[in-house]
């Protein structure tokens, strides 16, 4: 009798001191008070009845970022809750919904924990252990590259306002696709789409500008037609995973700027004036979806052969129209 | 009578001396700005203070050119007189006789070809447009005579001595010296001048403002630029030429757009007036007196 009384007292004290653990059936029952027999000893610690009548308040409700499961998950089993110390009486906590099912997306599900007049919410991704793999076209645009390329050609204006026309558009051709499946990452415990890419996009762009060239001694100026061409390909070589969550778009290809004079002026038997450059596209590193790597053109050259004096005197020439020291 | 004879002898002496003075081979130092459009790299001369220094042999009349119709000149300048006369007469035989043996096939082909009339008209038009001799430079086995007219600009005439007689000759050339020298005579570069550009302190990158400027005397180009040596010029305006819509000589009107400065922000740029175009920035163009400020937003 004495032993059972001590056990009952310990149970009672432990409830007041450590709170109630969450039971698996979503609602957390609060046991009825255990009657204390009148014969109990006076050395049992007194419980402050006033303190025990106050409910402790639910102050925290935390769910893992991601759960992987093929069966419905009991929220009570994965929730971490905490109460304040305003009272020793822990109220019943109700989770809504009590069970959550896996969905085939990264979308997080919202769960509410209610205790008395306190409602707290938390989000959780629940994904299947063997998720469905889906295949999609990867969105990609060369709009930024097109703007850059226009700016590059404009910078070749050589002091004049260039007259430029562009052909091609910013939309790539080809098909860059990815197979996507969702899983939880160990690193931060959150869900991610693992993407395995295949295929490629190709972008062809061209601009034609007219530009004056003054450096021919026997001509006041000649109009050179400058053509800028860019052909770029984009692929993704590595799948995304928990460590590399953003795809690394590898853009390769070439850009060129060059041209010729438009006509043979009077006095010239032959006029073979070529414009060339070191125009290039920076293919190092990763291109993210919203940025563009830079086109460069640090040197523009004129070269060729002109024959003037009605065919009697010819000059072979080559000179820099400009030569930047640094990348712009 | 004796007095008249004396005057006559003196005049003859002056004319003879004048003619002799027109052909005196001497050292000709030509300093060419390295940033003239078209300048070829030349390993034979150093670029000092952004200038190519050529020590040549010949005669230069830059600043005081010889107009062809003003004097009968001694050889080799006389070759230009003879060329003008032969083309004026449209005498193909006489024209061909001005050229040396190795050039006969070339000149005969042109004179008998479909470009014959065009060529003769071209030379006659040049003769009627203040054709003048700028210089003659000893080169290879001959003499390169530079002439210029108001319509077509610079011409080159290569003259050699064949059997004791001056003749025009064909020339196939790839040297930087002759190319750069020709550019010097094309542009006849004068000093870089500051120009008062009535800029606003700031402007929106998508806006533009019409700027009216009277160019300093002797200049015909305005260059606006920012950046470092070697970089391209931002904007060029030529009096009655590119980007200018003011027909009055010496005055230019042009639209200055914010996009000339490419990016928004505070810009330090330069405004220079020149008598030739520039296509890339050189240290000589980055003088403090040319410096301007603008904020592009």
Image: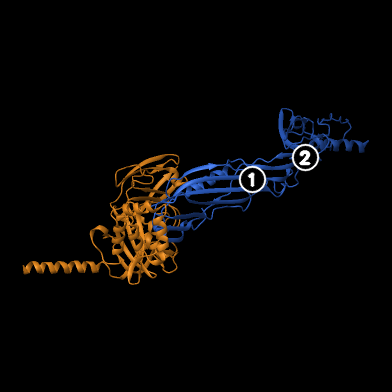
Circle 1 SS class: strand
Q: Is residue B196 left or right of residue A11?
A: left
Of the pair B66 and A256, the residue shown nearer to us = B66
Label 1 resides on the chain identified as: A
The image quadrant of residue A179 is top right
Q: What residue is drawn where x is 7% and y is 68%?
A: B3
Compute the Cα span from label 2 to label 1.
26 Å
For this rendering, which residue is in front, B157 or A276? B157
Residue B49 visible in the displayed image: no
Q: Position of residue B214 (x, y in %)?
A: 30, 46
User: Which numbered disc covers residue A133?
Assistant: 2
Q: Residue furthest right?
A: A1
The color chain B is rendered in: orange
Hue of chain A? blue
Work out whether A327 lies above or below B15. Answer: above
Q: Which mark is residue A117?
A: none
Q: Are marks 2 and 1 on the same chain?
A: yes
> Which residue corresponds to mark 1?
A202
**Label 2: few (<14), some or many (≥20) within 10 Å?**
some
């Amino acid at each position: 009798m004495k032993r059972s009384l001590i056990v009952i007292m310990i149970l009672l004290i432990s409830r007041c001191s450590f709170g109630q653990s969450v039971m698996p059936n979503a609602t957390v029952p609060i046991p009825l008070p255990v009657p204390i027999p009148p014969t109990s000893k006076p050395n049992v610690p007194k419980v402050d009845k006033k303190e025990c009548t106050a409910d402790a308040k639910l102050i925290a409700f935390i769910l893992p970022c991601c759960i992987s499961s093929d069966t419905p998950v009991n929220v009570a089993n994965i929730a971490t809750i905490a109460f304040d110390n305003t009272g020793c009486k822990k109220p019943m906590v109700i989770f809504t919904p009590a069970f959550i099912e896996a969905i085939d997306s990264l979308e997080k599900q919202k769960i509410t924990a209610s205790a008395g007049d306190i409602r707290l919410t938390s989000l959780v991704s629940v994904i299947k252990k063997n998720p469905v793999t889906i295949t999609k076209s990867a969105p990609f645009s060369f709009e930024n590259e097109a703007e850059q390329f226009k700016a590059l050609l404009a910078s070749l204006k050589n002091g004049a306002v260039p007259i430029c026309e562009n052909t091609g558009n910013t939309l790539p051709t080809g098909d860059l696709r990815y197979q996507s499946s969702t899983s939880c990452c160990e690193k931060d415990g959150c869900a991610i789409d693992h993407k395995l890419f295949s295929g490629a996009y190709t972008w062809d762009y061209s601009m034609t500008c007219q530009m004056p060239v003054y450096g021919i001694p026997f001509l006041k100026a000649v109009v050179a037609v400058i053509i800028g061409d860019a052909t770029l390909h984009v692929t993704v070589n590595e799948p995304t995973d928990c460590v590399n969550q953003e795809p690394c778009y590898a853009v390769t290809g070439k850009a060129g700027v060059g041209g010729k004079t438009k006509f043979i002026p009077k006095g010239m038997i032959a006029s073979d004036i070529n414009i060339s450059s070191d125009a290039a596209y920076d293919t190092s590193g990763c291109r993210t979806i919203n940025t563009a790597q830079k086109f460069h053109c640090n040197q523009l050259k004129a070269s060729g052969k002109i024959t003037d004096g009605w065919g009697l005197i010819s000059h072979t020439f080559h000179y820099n129209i400009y030569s930047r020291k640094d990348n712009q | 009578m004796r007095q008249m004879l004396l005057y006559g002898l003196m005049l003859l002496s002056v004319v003879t001396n004048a003619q002799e003075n027109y052909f005196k081979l001497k050292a000709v130092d030509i300093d060419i700005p390295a940033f003239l459009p078209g300048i070829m790299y030349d390993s034979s001369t150093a670029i000092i203070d952004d200038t190519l220094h050529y020590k040549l042999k010949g005669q230069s009349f830059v600043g005081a050119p010889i107009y062809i119709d003003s004097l009968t000149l001694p050889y080799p300048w006389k070759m230009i007189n003879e060329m003008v006369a032969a083309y004026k007469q449209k005498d193909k035989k006489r024209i061909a006789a001005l050229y040396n043996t190795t050039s006969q096939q070339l000149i005969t082909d042109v004179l008998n070809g479909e470009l014959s009339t065009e060529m003769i008209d071209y030379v006659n038009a040049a003769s009627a447009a203040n054709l003048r001799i700028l210089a003659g430079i000893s080169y290879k086995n001959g003499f390169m005579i530079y002439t210029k007219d108001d319509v077509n600009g610079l011409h080159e005439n290569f003259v050699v001595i064949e059997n004791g007689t001056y003749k025009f000759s064909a020339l196939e050339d790839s040297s930087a010296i002759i190319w750069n020298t020709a550019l010097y005579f094309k542009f006849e570069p004068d000093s870089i001048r500051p120009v008062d550009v009535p800029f606003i302190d700031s402007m929106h990158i998508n806006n533009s403002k019409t700027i009216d400027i009277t160019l300093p005397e002797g200049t015909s180009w305005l260059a606006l630029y920012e950046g470092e040596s070697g970089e391209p010029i931002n904007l060029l305006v030529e009096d009655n030429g590119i980007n200018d819509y003011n027909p009055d000589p010496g005055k230019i009107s042009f639209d200055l757009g914010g996009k000339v400065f490419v990016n928004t922000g505070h810009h330090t740029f330069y405004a220079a007036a020149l008598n030739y175009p520039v296509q890339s920035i050189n240290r000589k163009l980055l003088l403090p007196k040319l410096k301007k400020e603008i904020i592009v937003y």
